């Protein structure tokens, strides 16, 4: 994939040199940081999964422009290569800032801008669609999880039938410090939209709610102040039920890609929910 991405970058940008390979170890996508002849930095991303490519391209064309300079700009794409050329945004990894309340506040402001970038109809069949998603995971999940774990997930999703139909908004669906770039003055930028799609707003809090917010309610408070919304009972019901479903998905996904750490972390999240914690 690397040679093909370099060739595509030269086709779009002219002479370039590769600065770094920014690909994740799981190998699902390849990402190269390149610099063109004028010294401008770009990222060339090639997908191995056509669905991830389509979702990311759709997000960059429909919703990401609403974020202005707080997210990369789509320069070019190639459906045959499943490749994107994206502008660079400033900042370093958001991971060191995961417990900074001011950064959490600004990340909340940014996520609200993304969610406000499109209008979608209410999700009247949320429970049924989430149960269908669980059914599609059932065969591999039964090899990795206990019946009591899957029964808990199914019961939580069935209970969503009693929740008023929530709105759907454009979501990132992997929103957290790993995909934030933070500048020295605390400005937050977001990258990697390959999982983006229509969802309930609260499900975009998944990585935070089960991560840095777990033992730091002040971080959740700061983020939600930036987002300008609080979590109600119905929001928590959706977040917990769909978080349990996410745990099943991640266990299956991580097992298939040799990422046992991800699988173990999300199984622990599932057990916290089963024990009445999170």
Image (spheres, helix red, strand yellow):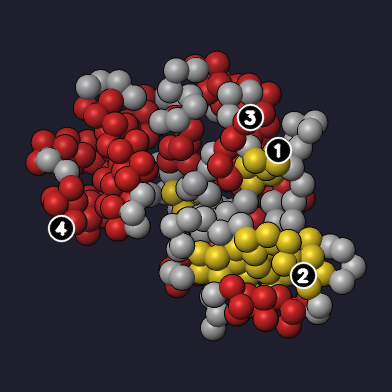
Q: CA distance from mark 2 to mark 3?
A: 31 Å
Q: Quadrant of the C terminus?
A: top left
Q: Residue furthest left?
A: 147
The residue shown at (60%, 79%) is: 4
Q: Which residue is mark 3?
A: 97
Q: Which residue is mark 2?
A: 17
Q: How many marks?
A: 4
Which of the pair 24/133 is nearer the observer? 24
The residue shown at (51%, 64%) is: 29
Q: CA distance from mark 4 to mark 3?
A: 38 Å
Q: Quick one: label 2 or label 1, which is nearer the N terminus? A: 2
Q: Which residue is mark 1?
A: 182
Q: Are marks 1 and 3 in contact (CB under 8 Å)?
A: yes
The residue shown at (48%, 32%) is: 208
Q: Quadrant of the N terminus?
A: bottom right
Residue 250 in view: no
Q: Quick one: label 4 or label 1, which is nearer the N terminus? A: 4
**CA neighbours of label 3 inside 10 A, class few (<14), some (14 to 19), many (20+):** some
Tag 2's secondary structure? strand
């Amino acid at each position: 994939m690397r040679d093909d991405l370099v060739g595509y970058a030269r086709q779009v940008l002219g002479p370039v040199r590769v600065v770094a390979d920014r690909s994740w170890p799981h190998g699902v996508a390849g990402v190269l940081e390149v610099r063109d002849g004028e010294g401008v930095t770009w990222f060339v991303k090639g997908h191995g999964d056509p669905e991830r490519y389509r979702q990311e391209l759709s997000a960059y064309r429909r919703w990401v422009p609403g974020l202005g300079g707080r997210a990369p700009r789509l320069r070019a794409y190639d459906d045959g290569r499943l490749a994107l050329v994206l502008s660079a945004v400033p900042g370093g990894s958001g991971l060191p800032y995961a417990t900074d309340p001011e950064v959490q506040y600004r990340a909340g402001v940014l996520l609200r801008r993304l969610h406000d970038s499109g209008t979608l109809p209410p999700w009247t069949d949320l429970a049924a669609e989430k149960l269908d998603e669980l059914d599609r995971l059932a065969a591999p999940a039964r090899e990795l999880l206990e019946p009591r774990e899957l029964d808990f997930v199914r019961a939580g999703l069935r209970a969503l039938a009693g929740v008023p139909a929530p709105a759907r908004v454009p979501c990132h669906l992997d929103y957290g410090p790993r995909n934030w770039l933070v500048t020295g003055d605390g400005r937050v930028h977001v990258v990697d939209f390959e999982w983006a799609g229509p969802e309930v707003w609260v499900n975009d809090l998944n990585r935070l709610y089960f991560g840095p917010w777990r033992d730091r309610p002040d971080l959740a408070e700061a983020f939600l102040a930036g987002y300008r919304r609080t979590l109600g009972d119905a929001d928590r019901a959706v977040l917990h039920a769909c978080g349990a479903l996410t745990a099943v998905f991640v266990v299956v996904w991580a097992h298939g890609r040799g990422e046992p750490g991800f699988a173990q972390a999300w199984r622990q999240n599932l057990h916290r929910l089963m024990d009445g914690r999170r």
